[in-house]
């Protein structure tokens, strides 16, 4: 065999449910040690999905070794073995489990050796097929680095490139720096003086992490010396505690401030109060935690007002919850109640007349937060801050999701208070000073590796100091997300809400100023979480991160590629990341001059459809299509010939509803680009990370939060065919592909999308498909045709069912479990060669007063015994199984399957069919039941083989006897 790559697992089947579950779990905020703690990047792919995809893209499908796995059954068994490896691989707890990773790497090596044997005659065999060296990996749209990191974890030397310098920096921190300094002990003097640190072995990047922690602590202490006067403690006075029994224990004590909560103000539009700066407060609630409620109370005194703080529930909760806000950006004047329109606020903002007023102070108490009223000296302390530098860089006012420009905030520096600017500049500048200390200490500890900088590829003391500085600068940059005037107070969790919890820069009317030195959201907590996250990085093989435009790169040459390009107009990465870039440039500009050459992140080549940047919607779409086609074209010509390329496409939720099922503007534009660039698409796998969207998504396909395309370059000899020939080819290929997917136990919810892959495989394998008038068949039309053939194939499967079931499916399609006319039911029964009376006798149909209705699972006879049923139907089997599964679980369903024996098998196919109907008809609750049955099927069958009992360990008492 030479020149034709063996089919990879990802082209045939995937254990999607396991990948989805692991991906969703990983997304939970409580997942610790996640690399995302090092720095924000928007729309990161879950590591679990990235790991599974790269593995399945590198490992052969058993059907491509017919000499070893001769029968379909043997192939299926082998596939299940590979699935088990993936199922283990994706679990978060196994991220650094070497035993599990080694098993996966061994499979990759095995497929690699077989590829090397296949391609001995390849003209570039020596260079591309060295059986002792795995090919390297490249992701040209690396972003937050999930894919390059997982490729590295699976044993591939990894290359990450991105147009955006912030993304490149993140990738340096994730894949390039750790292997460079792996196994080295820390250089800080504390490490060489503390016994337990001297005795420790320094695996992976632990030594480096320890230095980041140490010099981070030094920076924190140093910053405290320089700017702690701006963050005075607050003394609790008897006056403050007069009506606040909760404050009595604190009288005379000085508490550390966690945060100051401010409201923006405008001059009242009511002429009677035109001299008063009234607050624009989105809420007065400080804490909504049960029994710990606290809120701000405005006290009006003549023609002025002040704020105080009360604990407990406010008298008028609704009013306290809404502050002075009416709706959207409209407020009311606190003094007069007059409305303050959004337009008035915008005009005031643009004239530079928006002010601020302190509403409350959050301090560290003995057991939790203490909420205090503002005192005049606190505003004075804030005003004392005089920034010596600020990022006076204008941002693009029409960037996607940017709203603040409407209110006169046009430069990045406008998003920070003076005190925040002073703190951030202090920490940014301390990065440089810390770096000098690291280099001094590294030299003192005789670190070898030469004098080159990190940017020049060095690995000695200079580069090491640069590396530590990178992590410290990233911690500072990450802190900006919590330390800007668009962060609001989260009164449910009682902490600060980061700006970039969304991919936007929205306005915040009341905002929080955090202290860098308290226990909550402090600057050093960023360092700590970064150090913690470094435990999930890799010590080898090498990683490389650099800046490159994906539309003009050649790094992919001879490499395995998996990539996650930007999605049309979903995220404006360049505009958003400037927020961080301006600070990173301050701290790292001289260390990594090539990366931070420009004043702001380069935008012209960024592949995002931003109408305001490209002169309109159509131009933006064209720009995206052309650029993406070019980027994909680079891949078709360059990547490793033995492996498919995998490409992620993420849906925006709204997109899914545009055209029912599978098509949408962004999706079609993207598919067009991939196809036009010369790729054949052989797989389209839906992957979910948002499990909570489950029931909402059914019927709209919104569940597919991203789709992985599996692609190969199209052959130069590809033929042109007609539309009719395309349909015939689909009819030949789709049934088998569908069968493989169903045997792989794909969830019905994913079937429609997954089956598009093989359909697209047929459509894209030809150079052109022409309709009767000689016009090319569009992607949209091809998708429609694929769906039609898919529906027909599923309907054909029905041919194998008994007559009653075929009747019931047709009736169900029409009426679900609702009643319909007897006459219609009877006529249909003639066509299906059965009778209404017979089915009523079979106890799954009711017929009364001229109306006929299918019985719901919970209405079916509970004493049903398949052994004595004289008219056993697949319909009953499915619905009885659902009844038992929902009432008593998999063990009970397994007992029923054991009784049914081979008669159970059609049930799964029927469940798929019924699911598809529910999906089309938007019957979400019923769809869930069918989906659940298919999902539980492997376990039910396994338990049935075990004799209908779940495999639980017998409980053993103290004396070792089974209970
Ligand atoms: C969807 S994100 C990648 C996310 C990444 N997979 C992760 O898990 O974090 C797409 C990336 O493409 C980058 N990008 C946009 N246009 C580019 C271009 N012309 N060349 C290279 N990268 C580009 C963006 O900066 C962004 O980081």
Image (tube, rainbow, N blue to C red):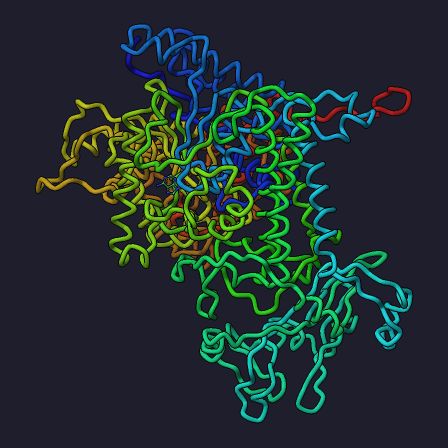
Seen from this angle, which residue lies furthest bottom?
272
Residue 377, quarter of picture: bottom right
> Looking at the image, which is closer to me, 799 or 568?
568
Q: Quadrant of ligand 1?
A: top left
Nearer to us in this view, 799 or 446: 446
Left or right? Give the position of 361 relative to 62.
Answer: right
Provide residue 474's location: percent of width, then percent of height: 58, 42
Name the residue at 21% across, 34% down.
Answer: 727
Q: How many marks?
A: 0
Q: Nearer the viewer, residue 616 or 52?
A: 616
890 above or below 77? below
Q: Residue 113: give x, y in percent of width and height.
A: 43, 9
Instruction: Name the spot of residue 912 as percent of width and height, x first.
Output: 43, 37
Image height of 878 relative to 179, above or below: below
Does residue 900 appear to the left or right of 637 in the view shown?
right
In the picture, the quarter occupied by the C terminus is top right
Residue 593 visible, this orientation: yes
Tell me if I can see residue 915 in this picture: no
Is residue 788 left or right of 491 when viewed as pictured? left
Percent from the top left, x then y, of residue 171? 50, 34
């Amino acid at each position: 065999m030479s020149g034709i790559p063996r089919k990879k697992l990802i082209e045939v089947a995937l254990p999607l449910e396991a990948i989805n579950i692991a991906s969703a779990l990983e997304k939970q905020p409580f997942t610790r040690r996640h690399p995302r703690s090092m720095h924000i990047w928007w729309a990161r792919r879950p590591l679990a999905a990235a790991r599974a995809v790269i593995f399945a893209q590198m490992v052969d499908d058993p059907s491509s070794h017919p000499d070893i796995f001769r029968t379909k059954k043997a192939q299926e068994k082998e596939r299940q073995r590979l699935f088990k490896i993936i199922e283990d691989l994706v679990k978060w707890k196994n991220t650094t489990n070497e035993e599990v990773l080694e098993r996966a790497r061994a499979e990759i090596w095995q497929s690699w050796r077989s590829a090397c044997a296949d391609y001995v005659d390849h003209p570039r065999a020596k260079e591309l097929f060295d059986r002792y060296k795995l090919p390297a990996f490249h992701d040209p749209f690396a972003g937050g680095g999930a894919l390059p990191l997982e490729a590295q974890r699976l044993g591939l030397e990894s290359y990450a490139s991105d147009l955006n310098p912030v993304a490149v920096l993140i990738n340096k921190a994730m894949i390039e720096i750790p292997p460079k300094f792996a196994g080295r002990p820390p250089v800080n003097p504390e490490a060489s003086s503390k016994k337990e640190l001297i005795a420790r072995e320094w695996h992976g990047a632990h030594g480096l992490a320890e230095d980041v922690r140490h010099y981070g602590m030094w920076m924190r202490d140093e910053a405290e010396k320089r700017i702690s006067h701006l963050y005075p403690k607050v003394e609790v006075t008897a006056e403050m505690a007069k009506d606040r029994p909760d404050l009595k224990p604190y009288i005379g004590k000085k508490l550390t401030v966690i945060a100051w909560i401010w409201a923006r103000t405008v001059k009242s539009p009511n002429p009677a109060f035109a001299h008063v700066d009234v607050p624009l407060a989105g809420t007065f609630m400080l804490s909504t935690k049960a029994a710990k409620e606290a809120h701000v109370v405005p006290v009006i005194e003549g023609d002025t007002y002040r704020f105080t703080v009360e604990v407990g529930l406010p008298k008028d909760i609704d009013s306290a919850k809404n502050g002075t806000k009416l709706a959207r950006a409209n407020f009311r004047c606190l003094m007069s109640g007059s409305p303050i329109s959004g337009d008035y606020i915008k005009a005031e903002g643009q004239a530079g007349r928006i002010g601020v007023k302190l509403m409350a102070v959050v301090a560290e108490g003995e057991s939790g937060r203490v909420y205090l009223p503002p005192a005049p000296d606190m505003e004075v302390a804030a005003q004392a801050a005089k920034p010596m530098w600020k990022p006076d860089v204008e941002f693009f006012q029409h960037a996607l999701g940017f709203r603040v420009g409407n209110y006169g905030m046009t430069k990045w520096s406008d998003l920070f208070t003076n005190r925040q600017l002073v703190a951030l500049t202090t920490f940014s500048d301390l990065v440089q000073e810390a770096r000098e200390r690291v280099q001094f200490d590294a030299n003192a500890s005789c670190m070898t590796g030469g004098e080159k900088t990190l940017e020049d590829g060095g690995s000695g003391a200079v580069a090491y100091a640069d590396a530590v500085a990178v992590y410290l600068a990233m911690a500072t940059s990450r802190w900006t997300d919590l330390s800007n005037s668009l962060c609001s107070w989260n009164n449910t969790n009682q902490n600060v809400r980061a700006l970039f919890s969304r991919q936007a820069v929205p306005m915040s009317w009341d905002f929080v100023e955090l202290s860098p030195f308290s226990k909550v959201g402090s600057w050093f907590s960023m360092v700590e979480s970064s150090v913690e996250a470094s435990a999930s990085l890799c010590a080898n093989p090498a990683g490389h991160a650099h800046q490159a435009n994906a539309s003009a790169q050649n790094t992919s040459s001879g490499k395995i590629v998996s990539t996650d390009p930007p999605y049309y107009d979903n995220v404006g990465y360049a505009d958003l990341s400037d927020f961080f870039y301006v600070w990173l440039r301050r701290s790292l500009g001289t260390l990594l001059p090539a990366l931070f050459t420009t004043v702001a992140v380069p935008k012209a080549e960024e592949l995002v459809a931003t109408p305001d940047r490209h002169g309109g919607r159509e131009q933006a779409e064209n720009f995206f299509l052309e650029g993406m086609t070019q980027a994909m074209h680079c891949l078709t010509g360059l990547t490793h010939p033995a492996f498919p390329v995998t490409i992620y496409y993420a849906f925006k939720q709204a997109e899914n509803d545009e055209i029912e099922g599978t098509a949408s503007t962004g999706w079609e534009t993207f598919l067009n680009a991939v196809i036009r660039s010369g790729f054949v698409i052989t797989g389209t796998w839906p992957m979910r990370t948002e499990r909570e969207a489950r029931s909402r998504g059914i019927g709209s396909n919104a569940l597919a939060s991203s789709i992985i395309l599996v692609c190969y370059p199209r052959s130069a000899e590809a033929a042109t065919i007609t539309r009719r020939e395309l349909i015939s080819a689909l009819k030949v290929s789709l049934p088998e592909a569908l069968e493989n997917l169903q045997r792989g136990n794909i969830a019905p919810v994913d079937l429609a999308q997954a089956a598009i892959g093989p359909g697209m495989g047929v459509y894209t394998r030809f150079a052109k498909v022409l309709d009767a008038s000689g016009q090319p068949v569009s992607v949209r039309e091809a998708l429609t045709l694929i769906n039609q053939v898919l529906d027909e194939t599923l309907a054909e499967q029905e041919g194998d069912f008994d007559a009653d079931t075929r009747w019931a499916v047709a009736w169900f399609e029409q009426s679900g479990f609702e009643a319909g006319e007897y006459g219609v039911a009877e006529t249909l029964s003639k066509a299906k060669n059965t009778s209404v009376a017979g089915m009523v006798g079979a106890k799954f149909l009711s017929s009364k007063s001229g109306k006929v209705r299918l019985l719901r699972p919970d209405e079916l006879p509970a004493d049903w015994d398949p052994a004595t049923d004289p008219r056993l139907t697949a319909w009953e089997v499915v619905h009885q199984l659902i009844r038992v599964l929902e009432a008593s679980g998999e063990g009970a369903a397994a007992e029923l399957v054991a009784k049914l024996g081979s008669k159970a098998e059609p049930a799964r196919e029927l469940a798929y069919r019924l699911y598809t109907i529910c999906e089309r008809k938007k019957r979400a609750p019923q769809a869930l039941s069918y989906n659940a049955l298919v999902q539980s099927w492997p376990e039910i069958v396994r338990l049935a083989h075990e004799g209908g009992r779940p495999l639980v360990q017998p409980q053993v008492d103290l004396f070792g006897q089974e209970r």
